[in-house]
DNA sequence: GGTGAAAAGTTTCGGCG
DNA sequence: CGCCGAAACTTTTCACC
């Protein structure tokens, strides 16, 4: 996928990928940036940028767009990380599905280590957290360990993207 | 802010807040939803919706918009949570600022518990993670505990919003 | 909060390098 | 194969009711 059919431009390090990374970075920073601005920033025409964005969406590199909400301002003032561990280690490991209906769960990561998943949750109050933990425990038959978030200095920053050779901002030396 | 000056509509449970919550929820789910669609979903006119969205942005309820990127597809295939703890508990607690320059750090949460912050990081490889951890330790004078993410069943789900009375999807009973 | 027209943005299309 | 430019259409903005 890195090279085209063998045309004259294929010898250079794919300039295509470089521009696509730029587009992804820009859209990660501002999901509503117009194609016109995107075109100015990349030096391409509006339609060329449009083509590329559609391709990135189709390839799944851009999975969607979201408004970044200040949940504090909207009544969900308590954020927490909940690590879960199956009570019966032999049981089927389908916790994500069993928990999917709980809308307070914003993310679910399968992790290495003592626990099996880390959930990020948002609720309105300590009481609501207590109730949520009960629902998590009974829904997935797990024990929980909860870490309450006190404040969030920053979030949703877009990590700089890796280059074609696997090199990135935190790439190997 | 919950009620207007005492006009005829103030006796009912603020319908204003209800519509605003709807808008926020919709935009959280699709940050590029058009004002036209937003108007249809809320039963308002396009300009009324537009007014509300601008107000929500100005109030800081909507803090911005972002493309959701599949970092795996873009070379940053390793995600991890890094909990940090100051080596010198008496030193000034300015870890967030001291770490802000590391672009691999996507989020920084101050937390209750044994450790002081949880960082979410994205890197290209185990080697890159090793280097990043060194940078974190030396930049902020902290010890680190790292939990590697194996897979992510879901992420960026928008938690249902709480109602005016503090009642929500995980509200108190 | 609604309306309507002007401005800006988007999508599509045919052709060029 | 990818990029450009212009036409057709949609969205967004703005002044006024």
Image: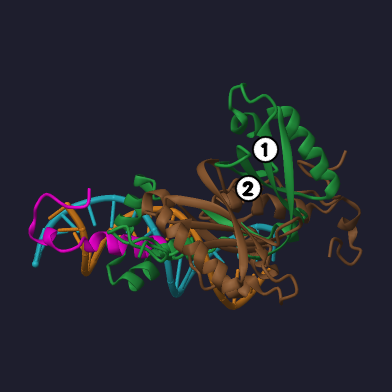
Chain colours: A green, B brown, C cyan, D orange
Q: Residue at x 48, y 67 (%)?
A: B103
Q: Secondary structure at mark 1?
A: strand
Q: Nearer the viewer, residue B105 or A135?
A: B105
Which one is nearer the viewer's eye here, A53 or A87?
A87
- Would you say residue B142 is visible in this rendering? yes
- In the rendered image, residue A118, in percent from the top left (x then y), is placed at 63, 43
Q: Nearer the viewer, residue A31 or B105?
A: B105
Please tell me in which quadrant of the rendered image residue A145 appears: top right
What is the spatial separation of the Cα atoms under label 1 and label 2, in whole angstroms?
21 Å
Q: Is residue A58 above or below residue C6?
A: above
Residue at the disc numbered 2: B158
In percent of the image, x 37 and y 63: which residue is there? Answer: A168
Mark linked to residue A84: 1
Specify the segment rendered in magenta.
A1-24
Is residue B6 found left or right of B156 in the rendered image? right
Dots 1 and 2 on the same chain? no
Tag in front: 1 or 2:
1
User: Which image quarter is the N terminus of chain B in?
Assistant: bottom right
For residue B144, what is the image quadrant? bottom right
Packing grade of label 1 (10 A; few <14, some 14-19, many >=20) is: many
Residue B140, horizontal then vertical, whole percent? 60, 72
């Amino acid at each position: 996928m890195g090279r085209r059919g063998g045309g004259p431009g294929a010898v250079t390090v794919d300039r295509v990928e470089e521009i696509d990374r730029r587009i992804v970075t820009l859209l990660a920073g501002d999901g509503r940036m117009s194609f016109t601005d995107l075109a100015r920033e990349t030096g391409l025409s509006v339609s060329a940028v449009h083509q590329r964005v559609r391709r990135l969406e189709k390839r799944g590199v851009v999975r969607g767009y979201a408004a970044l909400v200040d949940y504090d301002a909207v009544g969900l003032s308590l954020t927490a990380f909940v690590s879960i561990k199956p009570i019966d280690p032999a049981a089927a490991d389908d916790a994500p599905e069993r928990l999917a209906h709980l809308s307070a769960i914003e993310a679910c990561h399968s992790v290495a280590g003592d626990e099996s998943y880390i959930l990020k949750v948002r609720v309105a109050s300590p009481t609501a957290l207590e109730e949520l933990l009960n629902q998590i425990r009974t829904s997935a038959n797990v024990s929980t360990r909860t870490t309450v978030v006190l404040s969030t200095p920053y979030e949703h920053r877009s990590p700089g993207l890796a280059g074609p050779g696997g090199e990135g901002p935190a790439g190997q030396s």
